[in-house]
Image: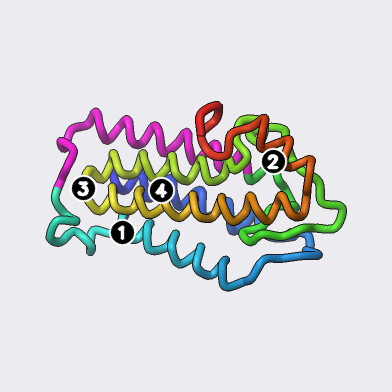
Amino acid sequence: MIGLADSIWLVLGLYWAISACGIKKSEHAAAPGLYFLHVCTLVFAFVLALSTDLRFGVLGRRFLPDTPLFSWCGIFILAVSASYAIWARWHLGKNWSGNLVIRPDHRLIRTGPYAFSRHPIYTGIIGGMFGTMLVVGEWRGLLALVLIVVHYRIKVSREEKWLLQHLGAEYSQYCREVRAIVPFIL
């Protein structure tokens, strides 16, 4: 099942790489060091969860039973979550950026998945890592999930401040109406 999880993440990664072509230039951008830290954290979490080379000590011990039920539930959650992230990324089109940026004629997107969560790409990646954790069933998968959740909570906090500063009252109203990560809950 880990091979299937790898394939789903690979499809998401390929979509990200291909769709990054032709992105609009930005007028204001956050420090590039933050983007580098973001990428390093994601790479580490994915290697931790998906690499069998890190199956040593407590990291390689199972905390979930090795049953098809957990694996198939994990694959389902991963596939749905990756699809949600792709939908969100597609919905942004040429306005997407891995870093905090303000583009010429920047506007707040509130349609599609952005009607349900302010950061649906993060929702998809967190959900996908939760599914991956179910497939892996080892402590390394849980550690990778915790790392991703903590990372995105910090990133969302930083982004929310930045977006409020640059988009003002419109973003403030959006924050009151739409949850940050988990639709209708968180």
Disc on the earlier residue, 1 or 4: 4
Q: Disc 1 and disc 2: Cα gap in Å?
A: 30 Å
Tag of residue 117: none
Q: Disc 4 and disc 2: Cα gap in Å?
A: 23 Å
- Quarter that holds the N terminus: top left
Q: Amino acid at mark 2?
A: His
Disc on the earlier residue, 1 or 2: 1
Q: Is residue 70 magenta?
A: yes
Residue occupying image coordinates x 38% and y 57%: 46
Q: Is residue 145 left or right of residue 66?
A: right
Q: Amino acid at mark 3?
A: Glu
Q: What residue range appears in magenta?
A: 62-88
Q: Give the camera-side residue of 48 and 161.
A: 161
Disc on the earlier residue, 3 or 1: 1
Q: Amino acid at mark 1?
A: Leu
Residue occupying image coordinates x 29% and y 52%: 143
Q: Secondary structure at mark 1?
A: helix
Disc on the earlier residue, 4 or 2: 4
Residue occupying image coordinates x 50% and y 68%: 37
Residue of label 1: 48
Residue occupying image coordinates x 39% and y 45%: 129
Q: Disc 1 and disc 4: Cα gap in Å?
A: 16 Å
Residue of label 4: 7
Residue of label 2: 91
